[in-house]
Amino acid sequence: MNAPSNCDLRVETRRSGPFTFQIGTDLAALKLAMQRVEDAHERFAASPLSQVANRLEHEVVVSSIFGTNTIEGGALSEEETGAALQLDPAQVQEIEQRRALNIKAAYDHARQAVSAKGWRLNLDFICKIHAAITHQLPHPHDQPGVFRNNPKSLTTFVGNEAHGGRYKPPQHSNDIKLLMGKLIEWHDALETAGISPLIRAPLVHLYYELIHPFWDGNGRVGRVLEASLLQAAGYRYAPFAMARHYLDNIDVYFTLFNTCRKAADKRQSEPNTPFIAFHIEGMRVVINKLHDRVNRIVAVLLFETQIKQLLDRKEINSRQYTLLSQLLTRGKPMPLEEIRQAPWYGSLYLKRNDKTRQRDLQKLRAQELVFLDDENRLWPGFIRPQQVKSIGK
């Protein structure tokens, strides 16, 4: 499977010289990797998503916004990002919170737009995404939704030496408008030619960043464009979750833009293969992680139901139920010593002796509602650690 040569597009700009859009990818070499993504997506789509859709979507949105914002220098932690997204946008004063809410607004617009029948990528969509992302953010030159037009005294450069060098994108608005229009035309040609969205989406991302059309927000916009094309093609959750994958592999991510650009400048064959391969592998990893997360959430829901039924049938007491609920709330194993020092635990056993505490825990372990590992950490019963202490210890 070779890339059709008639999909290459060379554009002559007035001031920036020639600019070439090309698939530039060894499609045959990536066929197996793409099939792995499709297989992973098929398994994911068959999982019980309907039971956990709201919770999964919330987690993906928070993680994705944290990821794409942090890549561009955002200072909020993931927990702070989640809290910011609960705020009323009209009441937000802090710039960091505004950045997070703006990305959420862009995500919401993108997901609503691509859900419309017959949606296609267009310049109006791109400008609206940029306007949402940069809304009310201070910048000496940026205007939301307006392409960059550099004065002679100010040159835009992209990248740094640590990630393969600096690159000078087109500087003038006429060239930028021309190239952005041609990017849309080129993508339409790829879609008409039957090029997979797993190829088209990262290519649009790559060339969008090389054009770098706005003063600010280009990275965030580029990742939303990629995600929008993937979601329009039927991929769920993973497109926006890719932002966290890019953060987790940030040095590779930044470097590959320069790797592909330099390879194309040297007229090497298939110069875009490294970035496309990186993207495809990221999709496989992200989809599998989402699948695992769905299974974990379902396990938690089933465990919550189970312990509530055991409490109702008086097969566990209220103290044991509280302990189990605390483990679920933490979402990870808790050192036994930390549990015993927790105020809620002290309140549970304020008028109880050590034998009662030990008996409660031993019964939970005997019912395999909790596990105690070799490091004296207590695990909820839906997760069995590799090394479990015997109950007699």
Image (cartoon, rainbow, N blue to C red):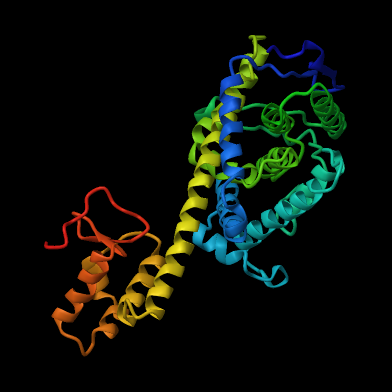
User: Is residue 135 placed above or below 315 in the rendered structure?
Assistant: above
- For the point 68% across and 41% down, which residue is it? 227
Quadrant of res 9: top right
Side of 231 relative to 323 (left or right): right
Side of 127 relative to 72 (left or right): right
User: Is residue 348 placed above or below 330 in the rendered structure?
Assistant: below
Count the marks: how many?
A: 0
- For the point 57% across and 56% down, which residue is it? 56
Side of 365 relative to 49 (left or right): left
- The residue nearer to you, when weighing 59 against 86, is 59
Q: Residue furthest bottom?
A: 351
Residue 267 image offset from top left, x and y in percent: 67, 9
- The residue nearer to you, when weighing 348 against 171, is 348
> Can residue 331 be seen in the rendering of this structure?
yes
Residue 120 image offset from top left, x and y in percent: 84, 38
Quadrant of res 149: top right
